[in-house]
Image: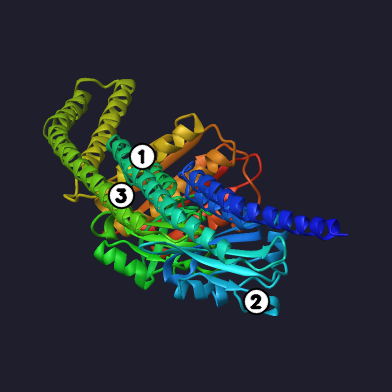
Amino acid sequence: MWREPMRQRSQVLFREFIDRADELVRPQEHMEGLLAAVVSLTEDLSLEAVLDHVVHSACELVGARYGALGVIGEGQLLSHFITVGIDEEGTRIIGELPTGHGVLGQLITEPKPLGLHDLGELITAAGFPANHPPVKTFLGVPIRLRTTVGNLYLTGKNDGQDFTAEDEALTVALAAAAGVAIQNARLFEESNRRRLWLEAGMEVTDALIGQTHPHETDSLDLVAERALRASDSVLALIAGPAGDGIVKSWTSVGAQSLPAGYRLPVSPVLTEVLETGLSQTVPDAAQLFDPEWGIKLGPVLVTALGHKGNRNGVLILARAAGGPGYGDVDLELSAVYGSRIGLALDLLEANRLREEHMLFSDRDRIARDLHDLVIQRLFAAGLSMQSLRRYTEDPVAHERIASVTGELDDTIRQLRDTVYSLQARGSAQELLSSRLLRTVQKAAWQAGFNPDMELTGPIDETVTEDVAMQLVPVLTESVSNAVRHSGADSISIRVTAHRDSVVLMVRDNGCGFENPGRMGGLDNMRQRAARVGGRCVISSSPGQGTFVTWTAPVAT
């Protein structure tokens, strides 16, 4: 009889012993788990990897089904939100992630541990997305290092019980280590970002030094591409004022690159950057871009290429919609990058002007020599030829003398045209004849053959800049159409400056086309002629090539 109570008592004592042993072992296991979690935080310096380690470790430590970590960004809202326990399909159903409202926002405004027994129907009010899986228990702990850098959120304990004080203590200890790890990851990321910006600046500067025309598209593409990479953006745009309150894109690169010639209205941000040369960040792309692009883009960074952007333009960087904003490092180093690139462009422009001045001096000397020596001697030779008429009555000889005299007169006229074209206008601007020749040289490189080009008359003297600004794009469009679309292997270009007009004629032997009036590029050529009071005639037919005649009046 007495043995049965003893057996029961022994079983009770044994169970109490096991429970007590578990209580003694469990803290040791928790400490080992905490130590392993802390060690894992030092294995990777990538910020995203560190954040992911923190959430996984917290869930394992306290047995939570779902975990998340929100990093506090600008405006006391969550800039990063890392989740654990929700698969890709669940993430898709949930949709937009939290930004820091409700109970989640309470941890931002009141950074202290927060445990809740049952969120229940308050899950939306708690700041969770409406389609978040149902949960009851909740534990939130701030991650701090001097100031609050983020919050750790845990929900749905595996055993269905509330999070205990021990769970809270473990999470707080992990959060303390996480704060240091996150700060180290941020410093590493900042150091890497600085390296990328500095390398980009050195690479672009070295490349620009070797450029003949630093403002050409290839040079600007390089400036934009390196800034795109250094800033981790999806768009890099270089633009400058185009008049009438418009800023026009000169070049654009990136996954969200804009169409060529994209026009931005001059916003207060662009105006201030252009006037002061100080970089600025914009949280919403809709402040700078039209709605079509505003919804695709997120934070924007605008920096001047130089102390003032009116000459070299501005560099506009943008990240994808919903992406992280540009921090102080990007703002600071983009300004250094822009200043460095602007200085390089200014120095190259100064060198170009110096070389152009030397070229003008040589041209003046050659023009004087041609006028004072060569033309006079040819003129004298012509007079001598004419005097030979009196020594013969032979009609054939007279005809030959007249022919040679005519050729000498033509040569003198061409030399005089050459003298006029060699004389600079005393302006620092590139001569129109040089711009026209450079345009054709580019086309020759693309086509694989040299177009036939002839410049006649005092083009640089008589053609005004307003007309030149229309003439050069028309030549570019005409030659580009012939090279890219018509399949031509012969292009003839004539630019003639008359006393009261300038005439451009471009003829190719390409495939031609029907109804030239319905092609957008050709319509632009007509519009450019109309802007300066001129006209454009385009004739083409299938198999017969295309002939463009573009005429504009000039000052007399």
Label 1: few (<14), some or many (≥20) within 10 Å?
few
Residue located 49% across and 44% down the image: 39
Q: Which residue is mark 1?
A: 438
Q: Nearer the viewer, residue 283 or 355?
A: 283
Q: Which residue is mark 2?
A: 124
Given the image, on which type of amino acid does mark 2 rest? Thr
Q: Quadrant of residue 450?
A: top left
- In front: mark 3 or mark 1? 3
From the viewer's perspective, tell me whether residue 118 is left or right of residue 478.
Answer: right
Sequence-wise first label, 3 or 1: 3
Q: Which residue is mark 3?
A: 337
Q: Secondary structure at mark 1?
A: helix
Q: Which quadrant: the N terminus?
A: bottom right
Q: Quadrant of residue 484?
A: top right
From the viewer's perspective, tell me whether residue 305 is left or right of residue 485.
Answer: left
From the viewer's perspective, tell me whether residue 294 is left or right of residue 225.
Answer: right
